[in-house]
Amino acid sequence: LIDRMVDARAVVYRRRAEELAAGPVVVGAAIVRDGTVLAAQRAHPPELAGRWELPGGSVEPGETEPAALARECREELGADVRVGERVGTDLPITVRGRDRTLRIHAATLAAGEPQALEHRAVRWLAPAELPTVAWVEADRALVPDLRALVAGD
Ligand code: C5P
């Protein structure tokens, strides 16, 4: 039994080491409803203002990714979400000059109608609209994955 506990600790420890090596993660939500996905238009910084993204933000130390995503959606949209499966692959992004990993999860609304509390606007995009908006660079790469996600809704 002690051996197995030591093994389990080692697994947790190694996973944490891998996470640290990968650096902090930024999580984003692909919130799906009725065959559409929610996009949010950034209000800042100036070089990103007006561009569209999936709502989200940085995972805080000690916070799980689903918890971070739920927190960000409450803060940014005033809505509660249920966090689902990963969408697409991890994408490299730069946040204020630092390398980060952007990781998207599918989500559904649990309560509340999303509002642009920290964004300029929010908008539900149908599949045909997905390629037409001015996405931030990393999120644009997710368009095919978002189409597939919405098609399966
Ligand atoms: O919202 P916040 O400023 O915490 O986002 C951190 C960074 O992550 C931003 O610089 C933004 O460009 C990036 N980001 C992104 N795609 C998202 C969410 C955030 O590229 N869906």
Image (cartoon, rainbow, N blue to C red):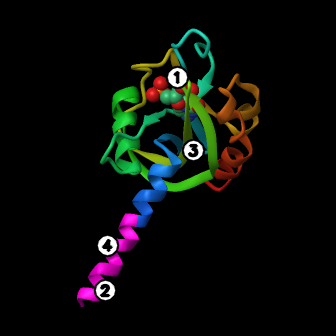
Between the C-alphas of marks 1 and 3, the distance is 35 Å
Q: Residue furthest bottom?
A: 1
Q: Horizontal placement of 58 versus 40: left or right?
A: left
Visible in this render: residue 18? yes
Q: Label 4's element?
A: helix
Q: Horizontal placement of 98 versus 9: left or right?
A: right
Residue 77 image position (x, y, % from top left)? 40, 28
Q: Horizontal placement of 139 versus 99: left or right?
A: right
Task: Look at mark 4 in the image and give the residue it sits on.
Answer: 9
Residue 113 image position (x, y, % from top left)? 40, 32
- Say which of 116 and 99 sits in front: 99
Q: Nearer the viewer, mark 1 or mark 3?
A: 1
Between the C-alphas of marks 4 and 3, the distance is 43 Å
Q: Quick one: label 4 or label 3, which is nearer the N terminus?
A: 4
Residue 73 image position (x, y, % from top left)? 40, 35
Q: Label 1's element?
A: loop
Quadrant in the picture for the N terminus: bottom left
Visible in this render: residue 40? no
Q: Quick one: label 4 or label 2, which is nearer the N terminus?
A: 2
Q: What is the span of residues highlighted in magenta in the rendered image?
A: 1-13
Amino acid under label 1?
Answer: Arg
Between the C-alphas of marks 1 and 4, the distance is 35 Å
Q: Which mark is residue 4?
A: 2
Between the C-alphas of marks 4 and 2, the distance is 9 Å
Amino acid under label 4?
Answer: Arg
Residue 109 image position (x, y, % from top left)? 42, 43
Q: Label 3's element?
A: loop
Amino acid under label 3?
Answer: Asp
Task: Look at mark 3 in the image and give the residue it sits on.
Answer: 34
